[in-house]
């Protein structure tokens, strides 16, 4: 591969489906820097390590919810995911709206 001005080692890794470390090893690169107009050896795709499996949607949603509110349970995440037909973004949006509504009502309830 002839390195273009816009190329990055991470971009080439994605483009060719090979691991960054493989590209660096095959080309004796000590860092992630690549030099414009240089030639890089690209390993064959089948020699690349398999990509990590994506986390299940309920785990992804639960992590996002927990980042905003520590007391969220996995069951709560699964319930919102069910209401959103498995759409993590929609489930997160629904949860945030409900949480904001609860937060607004909480001070009124204590007075």
Image (cartoon, rainbow, N blue to C red):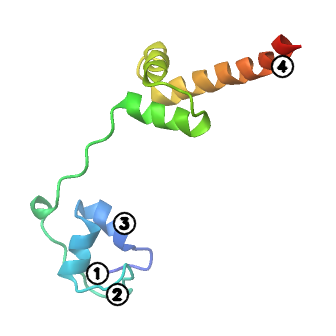
The residues bearing labels 3 and 1 have C-alpha atoms spaced at a distance of 13 Å
For numbered disc 1, what is the local secondary structure?
loop
Q: Which residue does the image show at 24% across and 63% down from the upper left?
A: 16
Percent x, y for residue 99?
66, 23
- Between residues 88 and 3, which one lies in front from this camera angle? 88
Viewer-side label of 2, 4? 4
The tag on residue 2 is 1
For numbered disc 3, what is the local secondary structure?
helix
- Between residues 99 and 70, which one lies in front from this camera angle? 70
The residues bearing labels 1 and 4 have C-alpha atoms spaced at a distance of 62 Å
Q: Quick check: 29 left or right of 8? A: left
Q: Are marks 2 and 1 in contact (CB under 8 Å)?
A: yes
Among numbered discs 1 and 4, the one appearing first in the sequence: 1
The residue carrying mark 3 is 11
Percent x, y for residue 39?
25, 85
Q: Are marks 3 and 4 in contact (CB under 8 Å)?
A: no
The residue carrying mark 2 is 37
- Between residues 39 and 100, which one lies in front from this camera angle? 100
**How many neighbours does mark 4 have within 10 angstroms: few (below 14), some (14-19), or many (20 or more)?**
few
């Amino acid at each position: 591969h002839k390195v273009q001005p816009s190329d990055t080692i991470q971009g080439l890794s994605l483009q060719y489906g090979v691991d960054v470390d493989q590209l660096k090893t095959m080309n004796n690169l000590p860092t992630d820097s690549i030099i414009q107009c240089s030639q890089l050896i690209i390993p064959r795709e089948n020699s690349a390590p398999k990509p990590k499996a994506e986390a299940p949607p309920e785990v992804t949603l639960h992590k996002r919810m927990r980042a905003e509110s520590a007391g969220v349970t996995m069951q709560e995440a699964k319930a919102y995911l069910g209401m959103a037909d498995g759409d993590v973004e929609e489930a997160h949006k629904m949860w945030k709206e409900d949480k904001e509504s609860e937060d607004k009502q909480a001070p009124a309830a204590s007075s």
